[in-house]
Image (spheres, rainbow, N blue to C red):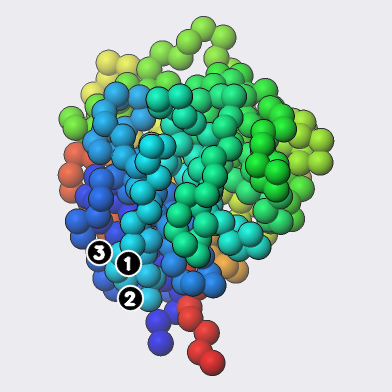
Amino acid sequence: MTGDVLMVASQFGQKLDFFDATTLEKLDTVPDLIAQPHEMAWDGGRRLAYLAHTYRAGAYGEGKPKAHEISVVDADARTVVDVIDVSPYEAPHDVEYDPAADLIYTGVEAGDGRNGIVVIDAATRQVVGNIPLEAPNAHWMCLTPDGAKAYVAHKEAPVLSVVDLRVRRQVGTIPAPAGAEEIDCSPDGRFVFAATPMMSLVINVAQGQLNKAVPPPGTPVPGLVKIDTGTDEVVGRLEFEEYLSALRVAPDGRVLVTEFRFPEPGATPAGPVRGRVHVVDPDKLEVLASVEVDELPFTTRSSADGRTAFTANLKTGSVSVIDLDTYEVTATLDNNIGPAFGGSHGMCLVPARQEG
């Protein structure tokens, strides 16, 4: 019987790979997905993954046509079994599943007067609500473990939105000068962590280019922000050298923060400019270790026991496997290595099916 499985989506390869999370063997591939697969959420009761599709081409801010679908993936059959159409909403990026309410939530970009969080009934796979937000472009989001609240990051908008999911309305904002990237909640629900500010980038993925731009005047240095969910106030900040692209809180509470690194302006690097994954103590807000990985490390997930991290490298098309005891890269998985921009993005850990 296969143990835990890691699913990895290639945004530009438009495919979904299945890896044995222990042996790291590639088990299967689902090709020809709808463009472009981004983030995933796991529905353990049904053993389904919900995979959001955000754009038809390109990346955030390129002005390309936007997608409006969420693929429903049977993790055991390794096939797409349904597609949820969220139109007239568009560009769903992050997606979360609340098992208590049996609802799927996805953040969407502003368009035709619509924005915020789209609410989907997981049983019927029908859109059953929308929670409008004051800020546009609900890009990244997280839920508290009890499913009562959502916190949403809006890329360039200088706030994080706080949402009461029980009454389905925005109840506040948290300052995030110059915006924010990924956001996640601690396993005990006491704190939320956010990567700030929004990355200032020059993007042309068709040409394999994603480079650092000069940030607007007054942009704060990159930092990991810690928020108390009881008060919805910032209670700590840890600064970094380069843009923080994404983060995830591991089961033991350590915060895994990915950092893009770039060549100096005008320089021609001799080889890839590798990124880093920082492992942060959530209480002291101190870096425990920094691990060098492949180019443009992005989405990160960890094993259920918290001893292994998997980081999707957006440009390289690979996944770095990190031992969280020794803080070393132990393997590199081939998701879509070779193209100018491999596009490894969303990931999901699928626990082994329990027999009986």
Could you say which is closer to the camera, residue 167 or residue 331? 167
Residue ranking furthest to the top: 217
> Mark 3 highlights which residue?
30
Q: Nearer the viewer, mark 1 or mark 3?
A: 1
Q: Are marks 1 and 2 in contact (CB under 8 Å)?
A: yes
* Residue visible at 45% across and 54% down in the picture: 126
Image quadrant where residue 17 sits: bottom left
Image quarter (top left, top right, bottom left or bottom right) of the N terminus: bottom left
* Residue visible at 53% across and 34% down in the picture: 116
Vertical comparison of 24 with 267: above or below = below
Regarding residue 348, the answer to whether it shows in the image is no
* Residue visible at 52% across and 49% down in the picture: 128
> Mark 1 highlights which residue?
81
Mark 2 element type: loop
Residue type of the residue flagged with mark 3: Val
Q: Earlier in the sequence, mark 1 or mark 3?
A: 3
- State the CA–CA distance, disc 1 to disc 3: 12 Å
Mark 3 element type: strand
Mark 1 element type: strand
Q: Nearer the viewer, mark 1 or mark 2?
A: 1
Q: Position of residue 141 (x, y in %)?
A: 56, 41
